[in-house]
Image (tube, grey):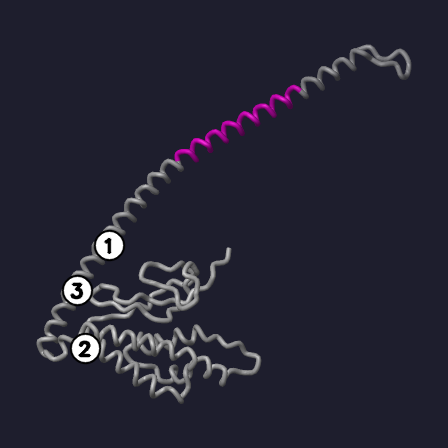
Amino acid sequence: MNSPAYPGQIDWSVAQKQAVDLVQLFLGTVDDQRNRVRRLEEHVQSLIHRLAAAEERLEVHRKSIQNLELSLRQARAQSEEEHTVLQERLTEVLERDFRNDNPNAATAVGFSRDEALDDMESLISSLWPIVTQHLNRVRKRGEPVEVVPVLAETVEILFGIADVDDGRLVQNIGNEHYSDVVRKMREIRDRLVACAPMHSWDFAIIQGEPLRPGQEAWRDCPADGLAQYVIRPGYIEGGRVIRNQVVFTAAWRP
């Protein structure tokens, strides 16, 4: 190797070798990066193929679940239909036996049932001012009065359970009207039992959902509002809805 003739002189052979080395290093680095990119691309493609296969399997499972849900709905509908038929037949037998044992009452069953249901509606209407006055009387200063939930609970206490919860009823309406309300309730329930021993009440509700068939809005509540409380339960005989459920609704808000 030739050394520089004087200080500061460039040894071009050395510089050329260094330049070649740098170029080779750069090219090697580029090749390494290309190889890494190629491996990453291959890995991504592999993941894409695996994801596509997983989506295909998921779609197969989804269709299987849909078929199972359809079969379940069909089986449930058939079961409910069979239950309704059996209940209707049982009701007819019980009503026939009742009328045979009570011939004088047999001709009055139809309209006496409607009268009893009308009296029930009148009783529920009368509960509104009773509950309102009682809550205003016992509430603490500054405490808001929530009449509708208490009214709905009172109706369920009177007609939704076999034995009246006396303590809860007094808490909702007070002592002043307790005896009269309970007497009217028992008269209505006895008359309905005499008309149709196998009748039932529908208190089922999904709060926050639109009204379903068999439900209607209470008073001035919006018919397209969302269900909140059952004010009057639906009345059912032999699987047939005789009176719709009356529901307190709230306006829908987005």
| Left or right: residue 225 compared with residue 1 | left
Could you tell me how far apart the alpha carbons at marks 1 and 3 are, in whole angstroms?
16 Å
Q: Quadrant of residue 170?
A: bottom left
Percent position (x, y) of residue 86? 16, 62
User: Per the image, is 52 magenta?
Assistant: yes
Q: Residue at x 43, y 80 (%)?
A: 129
Disc 2 element:
helix
Number of other residues with Cα within 10 Å of mark 2, as a class: few under 14, some 14 to 19, many 20 or more = some
Percent position (x, y) of residue 168? 39, 82
Disc 3 element:
helix
Query: What residue would you read off at disc 3?
Result: 88
Could you tell me how far apart the alpha carbons at marks 1 and 2 are, in whole angstroms?
31 Å
Return the disc, 2 or 3, that comes first in the chain's sequence.
Answer: 3
| Left or right: residue 206 compared with residue 11 | left
Q: Residue at x 29, y 74 (%)?
A: 118
Q: Main secondary structure of the magenta part?
A: helix
Q: Amino acid at mark 1?
A: Ala
Tell me, for residue 194, which label it has, or none.
Answer: 2
Return the disc, 1 or 2, that comes first in the chain's sequence.
Answer: 1
Magenta stretch in the rendered image: 27-53
Say if residue 197 shows up in the picture. Answer: no
Percent position (x, y) of residue 152? 39, 73
Query: What residue would you read off at disc 1?
Result: 77
Q: Amino acid at mark 2?
A: Ala
Q: Quadrant of residue 37?
A: top right
Disc 1 element:
helix
